[in-house]
Image (tube, rainbow, N blue to C red):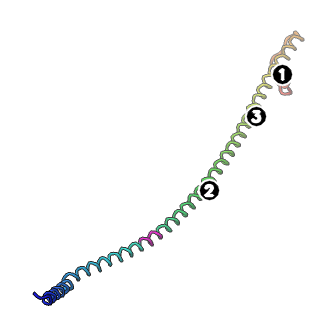
Amino acid sequence: MNINATLFAQIIVFFGLVWFTMKFVWPPIAKALDERAAKVAEGLAAAERGKSDFEQAEKKVAELLAEGRGQVAEMVANAEKRAAKIIEEAREQASNEAARITAQAKADVDQEVNRAREVLREQVASLAVKGAEAILRSEVDASKHAALLSNLKQEL
């Protein structure tokens, strides 16, 4: 064999291999590479959308937290106002109850003083009758003297 014939055969085999590769092997590889590039591009786009969505969600969460804090502050303020109102109402009720108890005690004391005066008047009237009986040692008319003692009792 001649080197030229070998070289010529190798060139024909090489070009046949190149043609076979370009016709049957390269299109699926190129298609797979294009699909892979498209998937990578799609993944990058999805990542960018995800990043954007995440930033929007963070903003919304921050807004909701601020709104929630505002509502909590408002609730706390309302609760403090209500507590102050309840305390003031309790103080007012206690003051009214104290005034009522004081008035009742004064009325009870006045009533007891009047009872004591009445008992004292009766005792003084009885002593006056006994004293008059002892002094006079005469007959005492109970009906006449009862009217007099009643008048005396009223004067005392």
N-terminal of the pair, mark 2 or mark 1, is 2
Q: Which mark is residue 149?
A: 1
Q: Amino acid at mark 2?
A: Ala
Query: Between residues 20 and 4, which one lies in front from this camera angle?
Result: 4
Q: Going by the image, does 138 lie left or right of 112?
A: right
N-terminal of the pair, mark 3 or mark 2, is 2
Residue at 24% x, 79% y is: 29
Image-quadrant location for residue 15? bottom left
Residue linked to disc 2: 77
Residue 54 shown in magenta: yes
Start and end of the magenta stretch?
A: 50-55
Q: Nearer the viewer, mark 3 or mark 2?
A: 2
Q: Position of residue 55 (x, y in %)?
A: 47, 70
Residue at 67% x, 48% y is: 88
Question: How far, Cα to Cα, is label 2 from label 1?
Answer: 73 Å
Position of residue 17 relative to residue 60, above or below, is: below
Q: Secondary structure at mark 3?
A: helix
| Residue neighbourhood size for the residue with mark 2, other residues' Cα within 10 Å, grouped as few (<14), some (14–19), many (≥20) | few
Q: Nearer the viewer, mark 3 or mark 1?
A: 3
| Residue neighbourhood size for the residue with mark 3, other residues' Cα within 10 Å, grouped as few (<14), some (14–19), many (≥20) | few
Position of residue 9 relative to residue 86, above or below, is: below
How many labels, in total?
3
Q: Secondary structure at mark 2?
A: helix
Query: Between residues 15 and 148, which one lies in front from this camera angle?
Result: 15
Q: Nearer the viewer, mark 2 or mark 1?
A: 2
Magenta residues, dominant SS class = helix
User: Which residue ends up furthest to the left in the rendered image?
Assistant: 1
User: Which residue ends up furthest to the front in the rendered image?
Assistant: 2
Residue linked to disc 3: 106
Q: Amino acid at mark 1?
A: Leu
